[in-house]
Each structure stands twice: as structure tokens, then as C-alpha cells.
Image (spheres, rainbow, N blue to C red):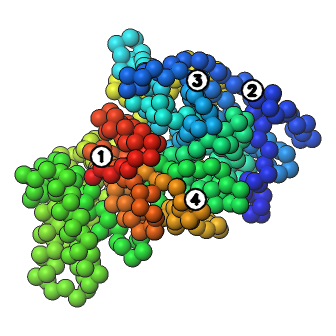
Amino acid sequence: MTKSAATLSRRAILLTLGAAATAPLIPSAFAAEPAIIPMARKEAFAYVRGIRVPYISEAQETVLRNSAGEARASIFGASYIARNQKAADRPVTFFFNGGPGGASWPLHSTLSPRKFAKADNGRGFAIVNNEDSPIDCSDLVFIDAPGTGYSRFFTDDAKPEYWGVEQDASGVAAYIEDWLKRHKRQKSPVYIAGESYGGTRTAQLLRILGLRENPVNIAGCILISPTVDPTGSAQIDGIDMQVISLPTLAAVARWYGKGAYTQHPVADVADMATEYANTQYAAALASLDTLSNAEKQALAARLSDFIGLSPELIIRQDYRISTQDFSNTLLSSDGLLTKMSDGRGSYPAPKEGDDSSLMSQADGYDLHEAILSLLNEELGYSSTNIYQRNPLEASQNWNHEITQTPARMDRVAEAMAAKRPDFRMLLLAGRFDLIIPYRLPMTVLEQANLPDGAYNYALYSAGHAIPDDEIARAVATDDMRAFYRGQKVSRS
């Protein structure tokens, strides 16, 4: 397949059933059109921070076509649009999760006006008002990329056209443009919000939509525990990942009362580890071959003080403990693994074939049933299609090739700020995240040459999925509100 065929054309035609008033179906010379479920539309209201917010919810599937007019895939989106607001001035935020290949349900179920809650009602859960939803400050659109959630491929050979860093972003960019056009919101301030791999997608969307000659009106982005380097490099401009991850390992070890600093607050231990990592540890790793035995013993002992593993193990690992090795080892004497998604949690070592990414239970109820309840019952979107949560196939077949630059988030942010001086970004990171240690995105974004106030960050006592933590979510969404209002956000 040629590059031009594999990458969705910017002239791709997007057709949405339910939008017939604005975009009539274009006859196709190809196979019969795929059956698309009509848009579900409801009026409702939410109570957020004591304010009643009337809104309209929309759930619909949008068809993506290639340049030849063939229906190749679809994107399912759930929108929450405030009523009685001046649309041209009101922000609209496009949210998505990571994977790659993951559906947007984690952000959808924690940031939309309705959320899951444990309940004694036979099913074990209820869908209730979400007082933390940022619907009071922005309209919200939750996007499932092709092959995730209710989004589909209409033929298997279409998968390579969307499963890739640039291919994926092109399809999502086309969806965003179509949404803005159909809702007549081209003048509204647009925000892009991505969690985990969504950070890589966000950088690509900023490049595609924000850096072109006639850009979309992108006011900023919100990065939640984001990937920032699409190449997956183990180094960031020469900074070793072991240096970057040490503060997170130290915070998790302190949480379990391990290491030499059990009398210090977690935040203080993490700050001490940051200072040590950036100075003595970084210098030791750079000159490891020249260190004496005594110096190596001292290095192992100091690392042990921070991360709670034995000096002997640290020496055997050549003074480099990956987050995965740490997860496997910290609680091994108790037969437990530390959760990568949130180091404060632990679980027995899984049996072969287990897939922890598809846990069916959450707080005692069936998670998949709750997701379908939100979409089918609350939004009124009835579908016989399978709701896809498993990102495994997409992740295994993802095309990581980068042909267009800039690609890394700090470089994209610099280019955006140069083109649009009022562009702003907000980083939300969890102190106990072993998947993406918080110092990784912080280190990258600190290197960006941005105007004062353009880069905002907040660090929480949370793991990878910050909105999943009820305490952190309440604080984080208030930080998002301040960000939307143009206020400086800085929380460590």
C-alpha cells in the first residue's frame, strides 16, 4: 500500500446519518453503504459545583471514506453541548484515551455529566450526576477512534489505513473538522485533551489542524499522563529514563513504608529523589565504568534508601531498575505485584493468559454492562454492534513510523506558540503512575521554549488514570476550570 493510500486524505468525505440536513448522502459506485444507526439526541441537565447546566447529548457514528469515496471505517462520538450558551464564544473540548487502540470510555465515564456509581440495586451500579464534569466550562466530545468502542472498520483491509501514529491522527482530525462544521462551531475555542497514548495523538492533531495555513481555532490542549515522544525513546535529549523514573519509584516505595525515608511525607521523598536523580545519580550512570567498587556500593545503598529494594538486587540490575522490574519486585515477598497503573495498588501475580486491561468488575459491578448502560440507556444509542474495549490487536499492529515533523510534544508546542501566541497547555500527572512516570512529560515540556504562562502543570496523589481517582478528579477538574478561564495552574 502506498503512503498516500495508507494515510487518510485531508479531502476525505465524512458522512453522518442524522446530519442529513447539512450533508446529503453521496451516491457510491462501490458496495452497498454500511448500515448506520441514526443519531441519538436528548435534552438533560447536570448540577456542577452547585450550578444547573442544561445540555443536549448526541451520540452518533460518522463514516470515514478514502479519497476514492469508499466507506472504510467509522468514528463513534458522544457529545455534550450546553444549552442557552453563546456557541461562538464557548470552548469545545475533544477527549480521547490511549492504548493505542483504546476506547474513550474511561474519560467519558468520569468527565461527562453522568458517571458510574456503586449502588445496591441488583446490578451493583447506577448512572448518576457527575458534579466534577467540566460541562460548565466547555462542551465535551468523547471520541472512539476506528476499531474502538462502537467505531468500526467496514473491511479488515482498512485497518492499516488507521492503525498508525499519522494514520490514526488523520482520521481523528477529519472527524473533528466535520464535527465543528456540522455544529457551526468553527469560531469556537477548541481544546484537544488526550490521556496516555492520547498525548501522541494530541501532538499529531496540533500539527495537522493547528500548524497548517488555515488552522482550526485551537486554543490549547490538556495532557493527562501523556506519552510525549512517539518514537518511544528510552532517552529524552540524553536524559536517562532511570533518572526520570526514580522519583516515582521512591514515592511508591514510601507509600508502602519501604526504604529509609518512612518518616517523611511522600511528596518530600519524591522531591529528594528528584534532586538526587538529576545530580548524583545521573552523574554516576554517565560514568559507571569508572566508579570504584566502594563508590558502586555507595550508589546501590543510596538507591536502596529511595526505592526499598536490596542493594544486592540493584547491583545485579546494573544500578538500573525499570518500572516493570520494580512493579514485579517491590512486594514479591508477599506474592504480590505492584500495579503499573497506580503503584498504591497491588494484586496477586496473574495466571498465564489473564488480561488485566479488560477487568470485568469495578467496585463489585460489571464494568462492561455499566459502559453499555451509559451509552444505550442514558444517551439512547441502541446498537447491535459489539462494543470493543480490547486494544491488543491495534497495539500489536500499530505503525509507529513518523514522516511529518514536528512530532514530539515540546517541539509541536513551540511551533503552536509561535503561530498562535495565546496557545496554552495543561499537564495533569499522577505521582504514583508507573506506566508514564510523571517526570517524563514534565521534563520534556520544561524543555519547550514557551511564553510565560503557556505551560501549566499539576501533580496529584493519583496513578495513571487521574479522573478515576475521586479525590484527584475533583481537584483536577477544578484545575481544568481555571485553565479554561485563562488562569495560571501550577500544583506540585
Residue for badge 2? 18
Circles 2 and 4: CB distance less than 8 Å? no
Disc 4 residue type? Arg
Helix, strand or loop for disc 4:
loop
Q: Is residue 438 left or right of residue 152?
A: left
Q: CA distance from mark 2 to mark 3?
A: 22 Å
Q: Is residue 207 above or below residue 36?
A: below
Rendered image: mark on residue 227: none
Amino acid, disc 2: Gly
Q: What residue is rendered at 16% in x and 74% in y?
A: 299
Q: Position of residue 207 (x, y in %)?
A: 61, 59
Alpha carbon separation for disc pair 4 and 1: 29 Å
- Bin the neighbour count of mark 2 within 10 Å (Cα to Cα): few under 14, some 14-19, many 20 and up: some
Residue 380 as seen in the image, left or right of residue 433? right
The kind of residue on which mark 3 rests is: Asn
Dot 4 or dot 3: first in sequence order is: 3
Q: Which residue is mark 3?
A: 84
Whether residue 369 is visible: no
Q: Which mark is residue 460?
A: 1
- Is residue 49 positioned above or below 27 on the image? above
Eye-nearest disc, 2 or 4? 4
Task: State which quadrant residue 467 falls in.
Answer: top left
User: Residue at label 4?
Assistant: 420
Q: Reading the chain from its start, which is encountered first: label 2 or label 4?
A: 2
Q: Residues within 10 Å of mark 1 (few under 14, many from 20)?
A: many
Mark pair 4, 3: CA separation:
29 Å
Alpha carbon distance from label 3 to label 1: 34 Å
270 relative to 352, above or below: below
Q: Position of residue 42 (x, y in %)?
A: 61, 18
Q: Give the label, 3 or 1, closer to the camera.
A: 3
The percent coordinates of residue 211 (x first, y second) are 64, 60
